[in-house]
Amino acid sequence: MAKLVSLADGVAELVRDGDVVAMEGFTHLIPFAAGHEIIRQRRRDLTLVRMTPDVIYDQLIGAGCVGRLVFSWGGNPGVGSLHRFRDAVQNSWPVPLELEEHSHAGMANRYVAGASGLPFAVLRGYTGTDLPRHTPNIRTIDCPFTGETLTAVPALRPDVTVVHAQRADRAGNVQIWGITGVQKEAVLAARRSLVTVEEIVDRLEPVPGQVVLPGWAVTAVAPVPGGSHPSYTQGYSVRDNDFYLAWDAISRDRDSFKQWLDRHVRKAEAQA
């Protein structure tokens, strides 16, 4: 059974320097609050994994938490580039950033392989792209039955996966609905998992299209209302589009980024 913890305690226990950390969520349910707590606790040399790294990964990279990024797309959705990401790649600020790039299908299949306890995934992908020339973890194999040439990618097994969800019950069973992406697979593939939720309830009421993560598959659950802001949580909040637009200017300049980080993320540490 998953245990109920505070966000600070959950990050302190489950996220360690040097870990491979997956923080998934697509369009909504992006675990911003958990990412900010990782920054406050000064985690370093993390390998971040995500199918679509966006603003929260820009913040973690700019805060110096990240040494390596495994991903399939990166940007400020609907706005443009991730400037802290770009600065780390081009100028090694605040620390150098190593990249491992895949396709969306490759990343999704890697999570599925990890969740299934398999060493690698096989797909008809990457053909006609230059990714295999730049990413050692993409290999071609011949099907033993048909001789067809396919692509193999190693399973993803994060040390810890962090996701946000709508609610959990007191036994740690987690309920997610809306655009669910690969949260289920990322949690099942991980050695440890932390799920932040909008609320803890006595009983999970069925919702159309829901995904339920059973308490035995989750390490810890932390109640964090609004934990996905500025993204949204379907049924609880709306997307803060103004923030995504504002982030483009904030993140372009190192000093403005550091001022924002001190004011909006690290100040919570000083007030604690």
Image (cartoon, rainbow, N blue to C red):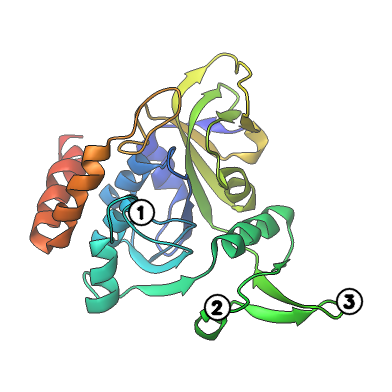
Report how far apart the C-alphas of labels 1 and 2 lie in the structure: 23 Å
Locate residue 144, reporting x and y percent.
Answer: 88, 78
Image quadrant where residue 33 sits: top left
Q: Is residue 13 above or below residue 132?
A: above
Tell which circle, 3 or 2, labels the residue nearer the N-terminal end. 2
Specify the amino acid type for callout 3.
Thr
Q: Which residue is mark 3?
A: 146
Circle 3 packing at 10 Å, graded few (<14), some (14-19), many (20+), is few
Residue at 49 percent across and 41 percent down: it is: 194
Report how far apart the C-alphas of labels 3 and 2 lie in the structure: 23 Å
Circle 1 packing at 10 Å, graded few (<14), some (14-19), many (20+), is many
Circle 2 packing at 10 Å, graded few (<14), some (14-19), many (20+), is few
Residue at 41 percent across and 42 percent down: it is: 30
Tell which circle, 1 or 2, labels the residue nearer the N-terminal end. 1
* Residue 64 visible in the picture: no
Q: Quadrant of the C terminus?
A: top left
Secondary-structure class at tag 2: loop
* Residue 140 visible in the picture: yes
Tell which circle, 1 or 3, labels the residue nearer the N-terminal end. 1
Specify the amino acid type for callout 1.
Asp
Residue 54, label in figure: 1
Q: Quadrant of the N terminus?
A: top right
Q: Which residue is mark 2?
A: 129
Specify the amino acid type for callout 2.
Thr
Q: In the displayed orientation, state which residue is furthest to the bottom.
A: 133
Secondary-structure class at tag 3: loop
